[in-house]
Amino acid sequence: MTLPRLSFIISFILYTASISGQKLYTPTLSLQRRDVFQDPERAVSASITNGFETFFFNQTLDHFNYRPESYSTFKQRYLINFNYWGGANSSAPIFVYLGAESPIDGEPTAIGFLTDNAAQFKALLVYIEHRYYGESIPLGMSFEEALNDTNIRGYFSSAQALADYAAIIMHVKRKLKAGDSPVIVVGGSYGGKLASWFRLKYPHVTLGALASSAPILYFDDITPQDAYYSVVTKDFKEASETCYQTIGDSWSEIDRLLQEPNGLSNLSKMFKTCKPLESGDELKNYLISLYARAAQYDDPPRYPVTVICKGIDGANTTENGILGKIFAGVVAYHANSACYVNPPTNVSETDLGWRWQRCSEMVMPIGITNNSMFQPDPFVLSSFIDYCVSLYGVAPRPHWVTTYYGGHDIELVLRRFGSNIIFSNGLRDPYSSAGVLKNISDSIIAIYTEKGSHCLDILAEKQTDPDWLVMQRKAEVNIIKGWIAKYYADLLAFKQ
């Protein structure tokens, strides 16, 4: 693997896994989507963001060992909004957002579910930043220093993060003398996994969890590796049969042009690339990531999959044939940019941090096998392990998540001891293929919408939200109300 190729992989497609000698776009688990924060209907007002106060907690570096260095502490950031809280005397609830693989700065604005519903619950709002992101980096290091330190990097794990959340929640409750206030944790995507696992690991700390778009079953062989891209294919085929067919035919056309003299140069001109293409894989990866993002974040009212397909189907192109249509879809999605495919990009904390998390424990085997819209590119665990060892000098633990949190036979297992978890999904989201889509018990509930996308239900409400999304959120709120009502009844009975 050449350095230029590796540089492209890191900077352009967020994070990739080494698969069969090629590089397949590995979808991000981020809640953030292109253009969503520029949507004036979805934006939360500045006054809401300004209602949050910033605090720092002296967090323990290592919760699970008793070596001298384990007792080192670092400043972990969390935000609190007191504006809606009914107070400790009334045991008013506490809603806690569990930060995921990004700084917490934008989350109070983006994650509107808590703020939109705080008043009716009289809830305290707490947003906690995940260790190693934002301003919550151990030992006063920069993010790069912490990630490059082989010893400090070892404390960057989901189990440590869950323990962090427990410590901060208990600290806040003690500080506010709110011992009887029930806690509801909320998370989306990777954060949704954390929310569900937190309820299972710390049932004495949280009454319940809302886990939005949490692909907790994309580990080991629980979910077929091609499940993600099968949903991407389904989304495009449902939007337009001709669009789906054109995309499927485009890969061989790219391969054909690459065999011609000046093929790479001609493809660069055809797709108006920001700089000359270095390989055909560079273009293919771009297109794969474009279709995956469009499907994952296929939000109303724009519906990016439909936008791309209208561009492809409506293209009046004779000179460049199939690839001219594909380029028209690219232009439709990006709304006439100056150039495409490989613009200058900055590598974010999310890019680098999630790469480590994938290479340590979050080993989700996403690949393409028998798919009618994409060329085969299967996930090969041995290649992935070699890739991670070359980067970090340590091998991933592909079975640790299911060992520590579970996942196999989840219906049988959670029915016996789990409770009070909402697994919410939108079936247009390819990650829903690894989510919990059926009720496990009376209190472990699956709520999904046919037209929903990734974490859409926990984003801020919009006046133009379709009825099915409004009903999904109402159902979630009613379930949480039921949990809290039962808790108050139990609390009253206990104190009598």
Image: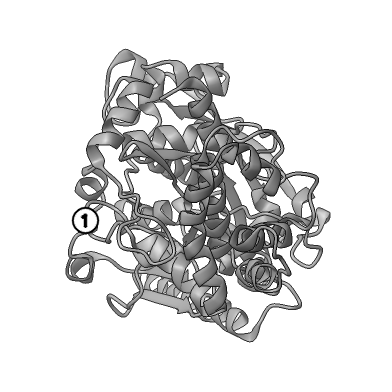
Q: Could you tell me which quadrant the N terminus lies in?
A: top left
Question: At x 30% / y 62%, what residue is drawn?
Answer: 370
Q: Secondary structure at mark 1?
A: loop
Viewed as shown, does residue 349 lie left or right of 216? right
Question: At x 71% / y 73%, what residue is drawn?
Answer: 314
User: Residue 60 appears at what percent x and percent y?
Assistant: 42, 27
**Quarter of the view holding residue 72:** top left
Viewed as shown, does residue 265 lie left or right of 169? right
Q: Is residue 115 visible?
A: yes
Viewed as shown, does residue 409 lie left or right of 278? left
Q: Could you tell me which quadrant the C terminus lies in?
A: bottom left
Q: Is residue 271 visible?
A: no
Q: Residues within 10 Å of mark 1 (few under 14, many from 20)?
A: few
Relative to 112, is 161 above or below? above
Relative to 459, is 289 above or below? above
Q: Nearer the viewer, residue 283 or 427?
A: 283
Q: Nearer the viewer, residue 472 or 219?
A: 219
User: Residue 375 appears at what percent x and percent y?
Assistant: 39, 55
**Quarter of the view holding residue 387:** top left
Q: Nearer the viewer, residue 470 or 15?
A: 15
Viewed as shown, does residue 114 lie left or right of 158? right
**Quarter of the view holding residue 418:** bottom left
Q: Mark 1 highlights which residue? A: 221
Q: Amino acid at mark 1?
A: Asp
User: Residue 466 appears at what percent x and percent y?
Assistant: 66, 82
Q: Nearer the viewer, residue 197 or 20?
A: 20
User: Residue 3 appears at what percent x and percent y?
Assistant: 49, 21
How many marks the image carries: the answer is: 1
